[in-house]
Amino acid sequence: MTDGLFQFKGRAFVFEDDVDTDAIYPAPYLNLTDEKEIASHCMEEAFPGFASLVRQGDILIAGNNFGCGSAREHAPLALKGCGISCIIAKSFSRLFYRNATNIGLPAITADIVSFAREGDEVSVDCLTGSITLVSSGKIVFGAPLPEFMLEILRFGGLTGYLEDRLKAEGRL
């Protein structure tokens, strides 16, 4: 459930360190282009049935180095496509972090993986970096998203942002 453009509330799916893009989206499906098909293969080896368990608005929580491995854009597309509203990780692969922003999926850097539990209700405010584990009331502050990333996310990703810029300049 989205409480605002940059505020999210959903159930937690928790992963440990070093979840690579092959685990998020397996290589045999890289030729797919349909978003629903892409989403259906999300985490299928690392967490069988993940795509069918995720509800719109759920939140993925992970440890260090989330999204390491290849730079495939399919990984954040699959997560977003199956309903993940935002990702919180202790750290991200640089390429995954930018790919997530570019496709309109917020990624917050915060260390909550050690106390978050699968199924916890989580509330996230991307503007302040505030993350609340609703059941325990525990509040953690991660890194708020920089303004330029918020601007990209406002348009649903880099494509929408660039289209808006080009229209504003009369070039589209």
Image (tube, rainbow, N blue to C red):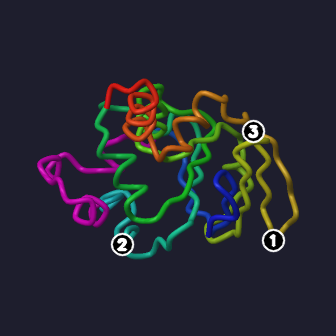
Q: CA distance from mark 2 to mark 1?
A: 25 Å
In the displayed structure, 128 sits above or below 125; it is above
Left or right of 20 in this view: 126? right
In the displayed structure, 81 sits above or below 142; it is below
Q: Which residue is mark 3?
A: 142
Q: Secondary structure at mark 1?
A: loop
Relative depth, front residue between 160 and 122:
160
Q: Position of residue 32 (x, y in %)?
A: 15, 54
Q: Position of residue 156 (x, y in %)?
A: 47, 47
Q: Position of residue 159 (x, y in %)?
A: 37, 38
Quadrant (top left/top right/bottom left/bottom right) for the N terminus: bottom right
Looking at the image, is mark 2 or mark 3 nearer the viewer? 3
Q: Which residue is mark 2?
A: 49
Tag 3 or tag 2, which sits nearer the N-term? Answer: 2
* Quadrant assignment, res 43: bottom left
Question: Given the image, on which type of amino acid does mark 3 rest?
Answer: Gly
Q: Which mark is residue 135?
A: 1
In the displayed structure, 49 sits above or below 125; it is below
* Quadrant assignment, res 169: top left
Question: Given the image, on which type of amino acid does mark 1 rest?
Answer: Ser
Residue 34 falls inside the magenta stretch: yes
Residue lying at 19% horizontally and 46% vertically, measured from the top left: 27
Q: Secondary structure at mark 3?
A: loop
Range covered by the magenta-colored residues: 19-41
Left or right of 99 in this view: 73? left
Question: Given the image, on which type of amino acid does mark 2 rest?
Answer: Gly
- Local crowd at mark 1 within 10 Å, few (<14), some, or many (≥20)? few
Q: CA distance from mark 3 to mark 1?
A: 19 Å
Q: Specify the farthest residue to the front.
A: 170
Residue 8 falls inside the magenta stretch: no
